[in-house]
Image: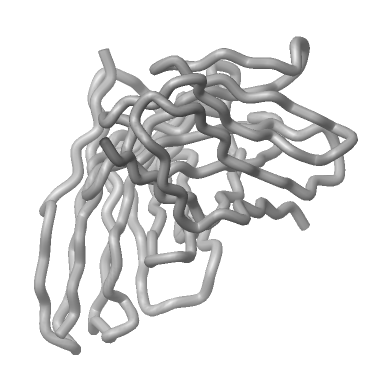
Amino acid sequence: AQSVTQPDIHITVSEGASLELRCNYSYGATPYLFWYVQSPGQGLQLLLKYFSGDTLVQGIKGFEAEFKRSQSSFNLRKPSVHWSDAAEYFCAVGAPPNFGNEKLTFGTGTRLTIIP
Amino acid sequence: SQTIHQWPATLVQPVGSPLSLECTVEGTSNPNLYWYRQAAGRGLQLLFYSVGIGQISSEVPQNLSASRPQDRQFILSSKKLLLSDSGFYLCAWTPPAGLNTGELFFGEGSRLTVL
């Protein structure tokens, strides 16, 4: 069965500092990997996704993530965080979206707090 | 462009009362539709998904049911709410097979508190 682990429940960083959120997955084949962001009381928005090709993927809002098959990881990074990045971040893994029945498995999320 | 709407945004209901949460998608046809529940510290749990009118798949046994009476309408229901039904419910959609890139598009969520 597929699974996702986000080992950090809560991370606090200073505005302007760099950020790395960890994500480890378990999947029996080539995974489709996603990072979503959720502002308080809101739905989720896709930051970036990895299906194949270049293992370093760029997303919206200045985020990037690197797929490392040997480590089963898909960590999210940003070189300099802004106060508006405070939110909850979810990593997800799923099968290729064939037949429209793709079902993602989400991690439990990492809450990011930004301090001035 | 496509949009997704969920309502109500917040709901406080007594134990044993019925529930109806509605979700509609605009600007697309034949979407795949999903209901997720989000509990604190537990991520998102897929409850139901649908690939067409009247076609509902349930992922976990529970006190809830779902229906899809129209192509772009997805309803989450309960006849008698339990305390454990409290949570944040999210509706989501994807394009149908062949157009699907795997990205889920989420509504803004419905906060249910059962007292």
In which quarter of the view is residue A97 placed?
top right
Is the residue A102 above or below the residue B115 in the image? Answer: above
Residue at image location 51% in from the left, 62% down from the top: B58
Residue extending furthest toward the right: A70
Residue B55 appearing in the image: no
Report the front residue among B5 and B29: B5
Q: Position of residue B77 (x, y in %)?
A: 26, 66
Residue B19, visible in the rendered structure: yes
Residue A94: percent from the left, percent from the top? Answer: 66, 40
Task: Residue at the far bottom: name it.
Answer: B16
As displayed, is residue B13 above or below residue B68? below
Q: In this rendered view, identify the residue nearer to me: A71 or A48.
A: A71
Residue B111, located in which quarter of the rendered image? bottom left
x and y percent of residue B90 in the render? 32, 50
Q: How many marks?
A: 0
Question: In the image, A57: left or right of B109?
Answer: right
In front: A71, or B50?
A71
Q: Position of residue A84 (x, y in %)?
A: 26, 29
Q: How is the image coloured?
A: one colour
Residue at 49% from the left image edge and 40% from the top image edge: B51
Quadrant showing the C terminus of chain B: bottom left
- Left or right of residue B44, residue B67 in this image: left
Is A47 located above or below residue B83 in the figure? above
Q: Can you say which quadrant of the picture contains the N terminus of chain B?
A: top left
Look at 70% across and 54% down and name the residue there: A3
At x 60%, y 50%, the residue is: A105
Q: Is residue A97 left or right of residue B92?
A: right
